[in-house]
Amino acid sequence: MLSLQHSRRDFLRSGIGLAGLTLPTFFKAQAASGLNRTRKAKSCIIIYTWGGMSHYESFDPKPDAPVEVRGEFKPIGTATPGIQFCEHLPLLARHSDKLAIVRSVHHTQGGHQQGMYVTLTGHDPKGGIKAKSRQNWPSLTSMLSRFHNPAIGTPAAIRMPYSMYDNGTQMAGEGAGWLGSNYDPILLRTPSGKAYGGVNRFTDRELNLKLNVQEHRVSNRNSLLEQMDHDLGQRIGSDVAYDQLDHFRRMAADMLIGSPVRDAYDLDKEDPRIREMYGDHMGGQTLLLSRRLVEAGVPVVQALCSASDLAGGGGDNWDTHRGHFPKMKDRLLPVFDRGVSALLTDLEMRGMLEETLVVFLTDFGRTPKINNNGGRDHHPGVYSLALAGGGIRGGQVYGSSDSKGAEPGSYACTPADVHATVYQAMGIDHRTELYDQLDRPFQICDGEPLPLL
Amino acid sequence: MNRLFCSFLILAVFTPGVYAEDSPAVKSIKEIGGVIFPLSNGELEVEFHLRGRDLMTDKGLELLPSLGKVVSLNLRDTRITGAGLVHLKKLNGLRRLHLERTRVDDAGIAHLAGLIRLEYLNLYGTGIGDEGLIHLEALKNLKQIYLWQTKVTDSGAKRLLKALPDLRLSRGVVLAELMATNKAKPKPEPQEVLKWIPAGEAKPPKSRPGSFIYVNFENKRSLAVKLYWVEYGGGLKLYGEIEAGATRRQTTYSDASWLVTDLSDKHLGHFRTGLKEAIAVIP
């Protein structure tokens, strides 16, 4: 949550000196700090299904479409009359009363990098984009963290358990971009659970704080700092290295001194029955960790529910060009269904759901046509996303796709509109202007909020 | 002059209501881990659940009434007890109250009875029972209450809902039950059906030692029957009667004979067991 101090700093940064201040400019400056106290959501968990989750086999089944479109699975009823999910989301179907499903999201980016970039930043990529570039738009995760100022030792944004890669190339769009390295989400590895099959990469070592060091090693708290010094020492000379060194060194030190975040990271402190509820898979344990981190005061958490590298469609990611149906049924949907259902149950019974916005994002949907390899290909033409908690009215569907799930049928909307909705739920004015490192003004979001609150 | 006026203006805006950032009460609250968020209308949200876990005690609660209009108070995980809640009596503007995972008790809840603006009350993970809930029956604005992992029973919950019909009462999941339903149920193996050999066709052979199995007898007759095990030496040992239409799950061994008679010991027929659990239907 934004502190008074923070808004003062913004106030001064906005360049309005005391001498020229009038009441309207003062209030404008207050508004520019982007703070709205009437919001319900205080924290946000972003669940990302990397590779492009099929809308047919999740939130938008098409039982009346021709067999070559509707696929092998049947729809099932949910807790909300009139809303159907794919039959392989039986647990999540019981939580439909908490979910707002958006079935009319679309954009024009057919590649993973581009689709993921527009989904996570709300902006179309311009030209070639590179991971870690400070020219990139900030991800939703880091942008949300910009409006929060948690306690010392608590990162404003964490993402887990891997970065997104496509055939060995790290994707642009997960970082803070022009917001600067202070807002790069900290990458954490989920310490337990059966790993996703496929290729998982941990090369972001300068951001990957390994909190699972032994207690006695924490007492001198050197191991982590040494590890970071070593990693960063090799990068000294690049323009951001010193900046990062300072930021992450401070963060690491703070997190290690008995902070609630460190406690939260220790999954052995969780009730084993709750751990079991989430499932003994990295997907479920990551979501459990998300809840624990939010509980410990981390305002924004991004959980990747997928293997890290798409690796040409191999492994447990959602890029299902081949063998779509068995992979969805056996590998992807069960872990997802159990994990996210447990998360919603858990947040609800602790009384946290109302203050915690849960957002489901993915690159794009999948094609209506099932290809010769029994797969579905990329389809940004229309797909489904979902939101829950944080004041979102559950049990509703916004928009629709056409009868074949190929194009928006009604109330077409974009990833930017979904972002605007998220900002609204979090009490952030989506038209807030922020300044990049060259002091150029940017409005944080181009979309308009969907009426889901 | 202009500058002086503006400084005054800022001071005025930053000190809504009675809240003053540098007042002694505010200073003390910050010292025990409190975080205060002033709202634009002068109301205050106060939190202790992150930084005040070990510092906030019943003594700290004494400080709250002097702060001003507290509308939201988060005391999760702090060291307060039920007795300390007496200091919340004066916070009659309170709309949200987090007491989860603290040592508050039924007696302490009585102090909340006058907080008529309360809309949200979180008591999960406390020692609250049905007695405590009775004190909440007059809180007509209460919309949500969280009671997971408390001593509240079905009847206590029911009583509160009767007093406050619009209340959303959340009791969470029973973890033990959840575990039971999550465990994959072992698939029942398809059972063999033992062949019924009527009395006229053959005499039941002697049983021979075998491996342990179950046989599920089903009496489809309209009268009760008697069940005998044919001993290794050929003798008969009565195991019991099976009522008409009833079933009996019987431990036995493979390669055993089971003779079925009517109640006057007239032979009706027999079964010979196989290697696996089986059903034996008495026609």
Image: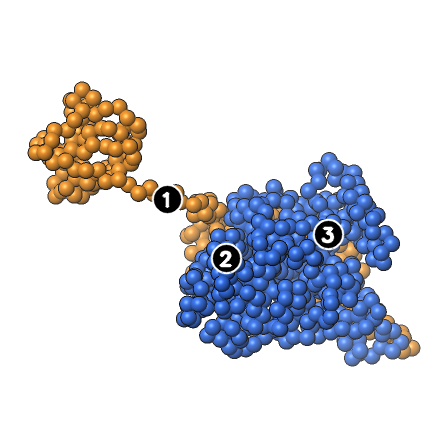
Chain colours: A blue, B orange
Report helix, strand or loop for mark 2: loop
Q: Which mark is residue A204?
A: 3
Image height of B34 relative to A103, above or below: above
Report helix, strand or loop for mark 3: loop
- Residue A82 visible (yes or no): no
- Mark 3 or 2 closer to N-term? 3
**Residue occupying the point 50% across, 57% down:** A323
Q: Which mark is residue B187?
A: 1
Question: What is the three-letter code of the residue carrying label 1?
Answer: Lys
Q: Position of residue B262 (x, y in %)?
A: 11, 35
Question: What is the three-letter code of the residue carrying label 3?
Answer: Asp
Q: How far apart are the alpha carbons under marks 2 and 1?
A: 28 Å
Q: Position of residue B167 (x, y in %)?
A: 49, 62
Q: How far apart are the alpha carbons under marks 1 and 3?
A: 45 Å
- Residue A322 visible (yes or no): yes
Residue under label 2? A323
